[in-house]
Amino acid sequence: MPIIYDDEKSYLFHDKDTPDKCFMCSKNTATLLVFRQIASMKLVHLCQDCICDNLGDYLLDNTRPWLGEKGKFG
């Protein structure tokens, strides 16, 4: 059964975002991080270089609560 949150609309990715490329430079790097674009309030994947150069345009969004028992893994 899939996990369902009551805030799904807050966690939509930008229409032009793809999970295997940086949203800004389109590089396919090993490490992409997810940030919220302030202008659209949508999530995007960014490489380390682009987030460092454009930090004022993005937010690190870690607001979703964890489901399940605290301290329990697996």
Image (spheres, rainbow, N blue to C red):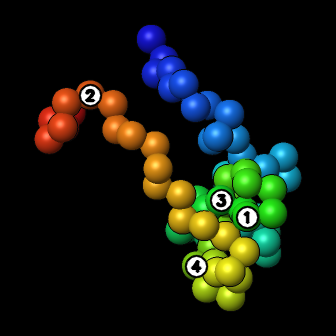
Residue pointed to by mark 2: 68
Quadrant containing the N terminus is: top left
Instruction: Identify the image quadrant of residue 73.
Output: top left
Observer-nearest residue: 32 or 54?
54
* Mark 2 vs 1, N-terminal side: 1
* Mark 2 vs 3, N-terminal side: 3
For marks 4 and 2, give the one nearer the viewer.
2
Position of residue 57 measured from the top left corner of the image (x, y, whole percent): 72, 74
- Taking the image as shown, residue 33 lies to the left or right of residue 53, namely left
Element type at marker 2?
A: loop
CA gap between label 2 and label 3 equals: 25 Å
Residue pointed to by mark 3: 36
Check contact, mark 1 vs mark 3: CB within 8 A: yes
Quadrant containing the C terminus is: top left
Instruction: Identify the image quadrant of residue 10.
Output: top right
- Checking the image for residue 38, the label placed there is 1
Amino acid carrying mark 2 in the image: Gly
Amino acid carrying mark 3 in the image: Arg
How many C-alpha atoms fall within 10 Å of the one at disc 2: few (<14), some, or many (≥20)? few
CA gap between label 1 and label 4 equals: 17 Å
